[in-house]
Each structure stands twice: as structure tokens, then as C-alpha cells.
């Protein structure tokens, strides 16, 4: 699973041995890492979170969040591409055959 963290969050900083950090504390606040570039993550419901540290990113990825928003790949895009292909094919056939 650490491979997935590295793909999405980048290399783990030195000294990061475990993702087990005060998981039972409901008031836990992640510290902002000024050297970490913000990563945008999405869940299956389309919710968005911006993470500002590697440990925060790893926490969310461990919870099922990803850096791909699957809600942007709906059926509308498939229908549009299909209709575009059909109309293009129709006009090419009409121009060269008739």
C-alpha cells in the first residue's frame, strides 16, 4: 500500500515510519508542511480535500481518497464523443461518396 502513497503523495519524508498517529484523537490537527506541495484528493462521492503535508496525504489515501475525480468521467462525455464520431463519419462519407 505504501507504493500507492508514493504515487499520489510523493516520497515519504525521513523519519516517517508509521501512519499510526493519534488515530483515536478526534481533535487531531495535521500540521502544514511549507516544503510540501499541496495535493488535491477526491473521494467516491466527489468531495474534495487539499492536503498540505505528506502524513495528511497518506492518511486520506489510506482512507480511500485518490487524486483522480471519477465524477468527471460520466456518461455525458461518452455520449458527446460518440455523437461527434457519428457526425464526423457522416460528413466524410457524404463528401467523398456522394
Image (cartoon, helix red, strand yellow):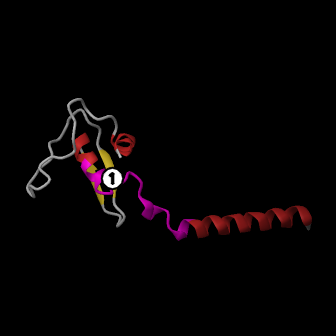
Give the image location of residue 95, x and y in percent. Answer: 86, 63
- Which element type, helix, strand or loop, lies under badge 1? strand
- Answer whether residue 53 is visible to the viewer in this image: no
Instruction: Indicate whether residue 38 is drawn in magenta.
Output: no
The residue depicted at 15 percent of the width and 46 percent of the height is 21
Determine the image quadrant of residue 31.
top left
Seen at 32% across and 50% down, the residue is: 40
Image spot of residue 71 (x, y percent): 43, 64
Residue that appears at 27% across and 52% down = 60
- 56 lies above or below 25: above
Is 67 covered by the magenta stretch?
Answer: yes
Which of 21/78 is in front? 21
Q: Is residue 86 left or right of residue 55?
A: right
- Mark 1 is surrounded, within 10 Å at the Cα level, by few (under 14), some (14 to 19) or many (20 or more) other residues, namely many
Residue farthest to the top, as pictured? 14
Residue that mark 1 sits on:
41
In the image, residue 66 lies at what x, y percent?
Answer: 37, 53
Residue at the farthest right position:
98
Write down the region rendered in magenta. 59-77
Q: Is residue 42 above or below residue 6?
A: below
Going 23% across and 29% down the picture, which residue do you hit? 14
Quadrant assignment, res 26: bottom left
Horizontal side of residue 71 vs 85, given as left or right: left
Amino acid at each position: 500500500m505504501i507504493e500507492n502513497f508514493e504515487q499520489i503523495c510523493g516520497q515519504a519524508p525521513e523519519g516517517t515510519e508509521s501512519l499510526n498517529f493519534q488515530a483515536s484523537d478526534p481533535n487531531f490537527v495535521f500540521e502544514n508542511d511549507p516544503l510540501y506541495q499541496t495535493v488535491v484528493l477526491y473521494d467516491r462521492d466527489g468531495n474534495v480535500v487539499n492536503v498540505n503535508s505528506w502524513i495528511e496525504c497518506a492518511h486520506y489515501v489510506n482512507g480511500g481518497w485518490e487524486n483522480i475525480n471519477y465524477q468527471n468521467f460520466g456518461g455525458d462525455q461518452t455520449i458527446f464523443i460518440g455523437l461527434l464520431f457519428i457526425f464526423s463519419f457522416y460528413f466524410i462519407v457524404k463528401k467523398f461518396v456522394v
